[in-house]
Image (tube, rainbow, N blue to C red):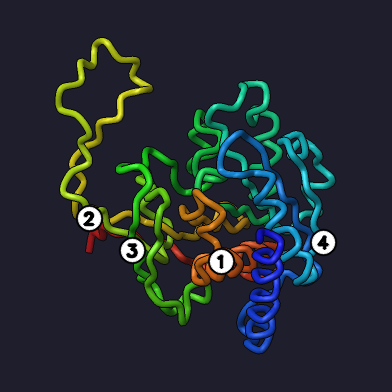
Amino acid sequence: MRYFKFIFLQLFFLLELHVCLAQNDLPSLKGKNILFVYGGTIHSPKESADLFVPILKAEGAKVRVFDNFSVYEDEKLMSETDLIIQAFTDFFTPVENRMNDKQFKGLQIAILKGTGFSGWHGGLGASNKVNQRYQFMVGGQFVSHPGGITNYKVKIIDSKDLITKDISDFLVKNSEQYYMLVDPNIKVLAVSEFMKDTYHKSDSLKLEKIDYLDIDVENEIKGSVMPVVWKKYYGKGRIFYSSIGHNLSDFDIPEVMNIQMRGFRWASEGKYLKKGNIITPIYKTN
């Protein structure tokens, strides 16, 4: 069943590629050098590579796959790379396998010079959780997924952007709705609202007897609207992020996979297209 599912997804995106190539204003991954870096113990890192790498190659990309961060130290390879796709959540990962300062520096320099950086869910938004510069580079950081496994609606708020153009609002079922800290200057393309009356799971926890990492009591956040999909620049590099993707089955939703692939294409163009101004501050002074 899984084999047929992968074949279906690849056929779907070959069709999507045909549509995209028919529109001159949409970029392509054809001929692009891509690094797919995966790891960690959650969010199906190896399975993510198994799913996406064939799709990327079918579009004509040259893809190299690595299961650790050491590739970020290879200055020559990084300089030749157009796009880095990262699926590496470092929660529960041994410290020695997490991104170290030297590896982050190599990644940062490559992005500043125009290499794109993209991913989804914890693979980008919950990776290198101790490095604030990394979080600033990505544009946001995972905080919590209130309510655990839940259903939520994703609303497209920018229907003119090439990444979300002609895509309608959609529902994500049985997945995690991320609550994040975000850079107010990212260009937000899609959002979700927290609809439950309350996310308090217990009012009687004796906090002094519980390790702070295990406390699972959130603020009442009903009605808050959280960015789900965004893009930004970091130097010349393009960053694209989507918080959807706790389960690989999330990508069975055509809108989710379509947005993710379009985001990859946009992020891969940092070395070839002129940098634009996409800062869209929420709070304006005039």
Front residue of this view, candidates 31 and 45? 45
Q: Which residue is mark 3?
A: 153
Q: On the picture, is 269 further left or further right than 243?
A: right
* Figure quadrant of residue 267: bottom right
Q: Nearer the viewer, mark 3 or mark 4?
A: 3
Tell me how far mark 2 sits from mark 3, CA to CA: 9 Å
Q: Which residue is mark 4?
A: 62
Q: For mark 1, does the 10 Å Cα neighbourhood hold few (<14), some (14 to 19), or many (20 or more) residues? A: some
Q: Nearer the viewer, mark 4 or mark 1?
A: 1
Looking at marks 4 and 1 on the same chain, the residue that comes earlier in the sequence is marked by 4
Type of amino acid at the residue the image marks with label 4? Lys
Tell me how far mark 4 sits from mark 1, CA to CA: 20 Å
Type of amino acid at the residue the image marks with label 2? Met
Q: Which residue is mark 1?
A: 257
Tell me how far mark 1 sits from mark 2, CA to CA: 24 Å
Looking at marks 3 and 4 on the same chain, the residue that comes earlier in the sequence is marked by 4
Tell me how far mark 4 sits from mark 2, CA to CA: 42 Å
**Secondary structure of the residue carrying numbered label 4:** strand
